Image (cartoon, helix red, strand yellow):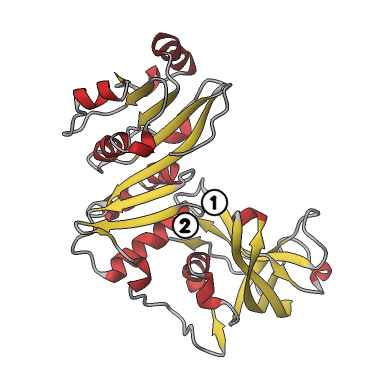
């Protein structure tokens, strides 16, 4: 957690996940590491009590005070201001209650989420996806790091599917999969893609668009220099450089209230011919370039042909 922290803000490190996912173990481990050491006091706000407890000696050694909050209604900006006055911390850790909707979290004006980490139990992930997807989506949406532990015995196809689901809800996070032996090397996972990635032209059918988008985001080098063809909706903006647009699809990552547009920047000399919400069939070569939105390198399309197409009524679902 090596961050440059402004003097005029209260940094909040938010650790979330459902009950018994391993949040307490993660925080306990982190607080024992040298890189965690810092001058001043730390305030740890625990929003749910699991079976694992924090070691009192370790907390004292790290000058960490613990406050338990058992109600979302109590967690107001005014209450957090009061805690800051009482404990005078240099930073705040929060172990989030997975049954609370994180979208409802309100912070004092001078509090800033500096890092958000989601801990997931791989053995129960499918259950939570099926029954509590909106809560899961709220936790994943702003996460920089997602750790899925307890992946022992899960076949490659499940791990691949789980990773895609997480990526759909947390497009910029680092995803780590772990079993009892430590981190799983994800490059070794076998993937059953619904298209021939070695074809001269990789035809992306409408039902496979979401899988292709996530896989291309995760592993752009797999597609670099290859040609893809798919049907998509046009997105344009005055902010786009001349000769560029984004062909993509609307996707439902969590629920109907959480729709997002999934697409890659596409360079095409005839981009001015099309307007937003038109449907087109795009054949393009995939490249990898620096993009500001990626905070680094990511997929870019170099169109070879763009032509009008019929609208696809269905949205992409994960």
Instruction: Give the residue pinned by disc 1.
Output: 259
- Which mark, by number, is residue 50? none
User: Is the residue marked by circle 1 packed among few (<14), some (14-19), or many (20+) residues within 10 Å?
Assistant: some
Viewer-closest of 80 and 283: 80
Residue 90: x and y, percent?
45, 22
Left or right of residue 253: residue 284? right
Secondary structure under tag 2 reads: helix
Tell me: 81 left or right of 180: right
Q: Is residue 61 above or below residue 259?
A: above
For residue 205, side relative to residue 18 (left or right): right
Residue 106, image x, y percentages: 49, 25
Residue behind mark 2: 168
Q: Nearer the viewer, residue 166 or 110?
A: 110
- Tell me residue 79's x, y (percent): 43, 14
Give the position of the N terminus as an image quadrant. Answer: top left
At 44% across and 40% down in the image, what residue appears? Answer: 116
> Is residue 228 depicted above or below 185 in this figure?
below
Q: Residue furthest left?
A: 51
Q: Split into 4 quadrants, where in the image is the C terminus?
A: bottom left
Q: Is residue 149 above or below residue 101?
A: below
Upstream in the sequence, badge 1 or badge 2? 2
Residue 114 vs residue 212, the one in the foreground:
114
């Amino acid at each position: 957690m090596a961050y440059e922290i402004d003097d005029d803000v209260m940094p909040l490190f938010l650790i979330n996940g459902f009950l018994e996912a391993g949040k307490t173990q993660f925080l306990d481990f982190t607080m024992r590491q040298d890189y965690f050491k810092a001058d001043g006091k730390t305030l740890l706000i625990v929003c749910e009590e699991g079976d694992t407890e924090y070691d009192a000696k370790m907390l004292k050694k790290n000058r960490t005070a613990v406050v338990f909050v058992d109600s979302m209604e109590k967690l107001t900006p005014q209450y957090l201001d009061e805690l800051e006055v009482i404990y005078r911390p240099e930073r705040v850790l929060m172990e989030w209650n997975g049954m609370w909707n994180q979208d409802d979290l309100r912070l004092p004006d001078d509090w800033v989420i500096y890092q958000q980490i989601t801990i997931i139990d791989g053995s129960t992930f499918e259950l939570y996806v099926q029954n509590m997807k909106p809560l899961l989506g709220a936790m994943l949406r702003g996460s920089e790091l997602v750790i899925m532990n307890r992946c022992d015995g899960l076949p490659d196809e499940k791990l691949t599917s789980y990773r895609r689901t997480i990526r759909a809800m947390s497009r910029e996070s680092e995803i780590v999969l772990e079993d009892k032996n430590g981190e799983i090397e994800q490059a070794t996972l076998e993937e059953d893609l619904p298209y021939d990635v070695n074809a001269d032209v990789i035809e992306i059918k409408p039902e496979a668009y979401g899988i292709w988008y996530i896989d291309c985001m995760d592993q752009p080098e797999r597609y670099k220099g290859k040609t893809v063809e798919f049907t998509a909706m046009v997105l344009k903006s005055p902010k786009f450089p001349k000769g560029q647009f984004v062909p993509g699809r609307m996707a439902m990552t969590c629920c109907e209230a959480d729709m997002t547009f999934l697409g890659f920047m596409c360079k095409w000399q005839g981009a001015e011919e099309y307007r937003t919400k038109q449907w087109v069939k795009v054949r393009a070569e995939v490249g990898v370039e620096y993009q500001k939105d990626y905070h680094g390198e990511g997929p870019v399309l170099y169109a070879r042909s763009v032509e009008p197409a019929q609208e696809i009524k269905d949205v992409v679902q994960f």
